[in-house]
Amino acid sequence: QVLLQESGPGLVKPSQTLSLSCTVSGGSVSHGTYYWSWVRQRPGKGLECIGYISNSGTPSYNPSLRGRLTISADTTKNQFSLKLSSVTAADTAVYYCARGQLFGEFAFDYWGQGMLVTVSS
Amino acid sequence: ETVLTQSPATLSLSPGERATLSCRASQSISNYLAWYQQKPGQAPRLLIYDTSNRATGIPARFSGSGSGTDFTLIISSLEPEDFAVYYCQQRSDRVIFGQGTRLEI
């Protein structure tokens, strides 16, 4: 059973950097063909995949956030992290970490419980 | 840019009835699609991957079909716990989700 747990500040000021980590247990961020992902959900809205990092360390970012977003992995802690710079109120959302797997095609088979991050002064 | 459009936006049914949810892609990018269920305050849960394969632990009343641009999720006989929001998902140059269908009693 793979478990994912998000952690980080729940409140970030506008123009600052949002930083979250996801700790993985029951699996390894450096083994297997998986894509360690971040998905966000603005209040009352749908799901948006903002990016992921493969087990080889190659990141892929949603073009709408490219330039502000960095996803990285720390294999020693079995964690992966998200940094989103220059945040605005539009970045207020529940942020989920998830594991993407290539079956025939890509799907998210394990999810963290989610973390609400509010951007406000 | 590929867009996934789900219909209907809201589906009102009763327990025991059959639910048919649709997901249409603006262009054909894959014959594979995933479906998720999300209940209030919870993370999404993978129901179906590769269009028609049930994820681990998903009851047989959930089934998926389709190809190209048109995909369908069917819940054969609704249980009270099935009332939730359902999302479809594909990957092209990025991972995309439909806007969701709310299944309500």
Image (spheres, rainbow, N blue to C red):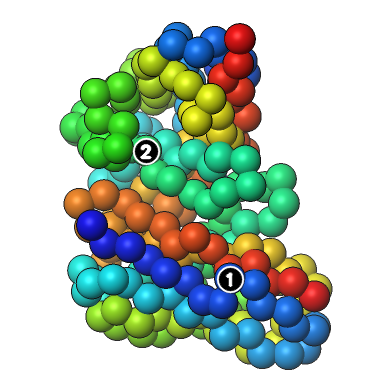
Where is residue A58 shown, x and y percent of the image? 19, 32
**Residue B64 versus residue A65: which sits nearer the camera?**
A65
Q: Horizontal placement of A51 versus A26: left or right?
A: left
| Residue receiving disc 1 | B9
**Residue B95 versus residue A56: which sits nearer the camera?**
B95
Where is residue A7 shown, x and y percent of the image? 56, 21
Q: Secondary structure at mark 1?
A: loop
| Residue receiving disc 2 | A50
What's the mark number on residue A97?
Answer: none
Q: Secondary structure at mark 2?
A: strand
Image point 32% across, 72% down: which residue?
Answer: B25
Q: Horizontal placement of A48 versus B50: left or right?
A: right
Do labels 1 and 2 touch, CB within 8 Å? no
Instruction: Give the residue type at disc 2.
Output: Ile
* Chain at tag 2: A
User: Is residue A85 positioned above or below A62 on the image?
Assistant: above
Image point 71% across, 45% down: which residue?
Answer: B41
